[in-house]
Image (cartoon, rainbow, N blue to C red):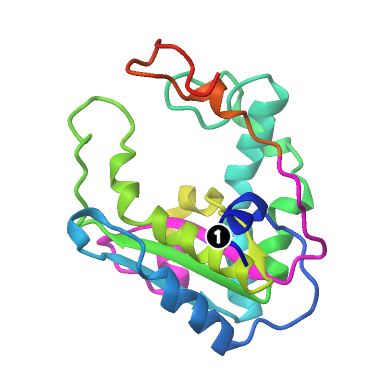
Amino acid sequence: MDLYEVMRTTFAAREFTDDPLPDDVLARILDNARFAPSGGNRQGAHVTVVRDPGVRRGLAELGAPAARRYFAQLQAGENPWNSVQPSGVSRDVIDQTEIPDTFVAPIANAQVVLVFSVDLGVVAALDQDLGRVGIAGGASVYPLVWNVLLGARNEGFGGTITTMAIAAEDRVRELVGIPDGHAVAAVVPLGKPVRQLRKLRRRPVAEFVTRERFDGPAFGA
């Protein structure tokens, strides 16, 4: 496929057919995705390939509590899991909140689930002293995650980046044997999408790109 077509049509796939995702196809996806950049080219990311149905179900269930908080805050008009705006939603409300099956089914039903982690011993966390939630370290793992999804789209497969299970990181580590020095970055279900979206909704460039300064004139206006 044309590169720009892949970029424009790689969507968050959460419903999959029963078509298999063979190891040779997955190997090809990973073999190309590994050329993603990482801080200092230290390549500290690790991918755990999970096909076992019981483990996949376990990963899905570990993300459920975080999903309850997400939807409880959403229903209260909050920005879920925001590090700047404290939540006013009580624990009782969170515990009673039902979550859509779309937050559990993709991981439980996908042909394969990839658990991405990154070795904190090699991550350059340049924002660690700024007094806010750190995001710079993600540069050493998320390009790899996105490359995998782009590669999957090119092969006729799809998936989505999920992060709900990160809130239960210790239990994820235990479930799939991730060492303490690794941070869990994403849980990605992969499979053959039930349907392929062609038109994705995204903001136009002029709405989020400016010239010279953050408050400068819009680029491309």
Q: Quadrant of the C terminus?
A: top right
Depth order, front residue of 26/137: 26
Q: Residue at x 52, y 50 (%)?
A: 163
139 in relation to 105, above or below: above
Looking at the picture, how far across and down is residue 76, in whole percent? 69, 20
Q: Which residues are magenta?
A: 172-200
91 in relation to 107, above or below: above
In the picture, measured across the screen, residue 123 lies left or right of residue 49, that is left
Name which residue type carries label 1: Leu
Q: Secondary structure at mark 1?
A: helix
Looking at the picture, how far across and down is residue 1, in whole percent? 62, 67
Looking at the picture, how far across and down is residue 130, in whole percent? 21, 26
Q: How many marks?
A: 1
| Quadrant of the rendered image containing residue 23 | bottom right
Q: Residue at x 54, y 77 (%)?
A: 50
Q: Residue at x 38, y 19 (%)?
A: 211
| Quadrant of the rendered image containing residue 61 | bottom right
Depth order, front residue of 151/187: 151
110 in relation to 86, above or below: below
| Quadrant of the rendered image containing residue 90 | top right
Q: Residue at x 63, y 56 (%)?
A: 5
Question: Which residue is disc 1 drawn over?
Answer: 3
In the picture, measured across the screen, residue 121 lies left or right of residue 212, that is left
Q: Is residue 175 magenta?
A: yes
Looking at the picture, how far across and down is residue 127, in whole percent? 22, 34
Depth order, front residue of 76/133: 133
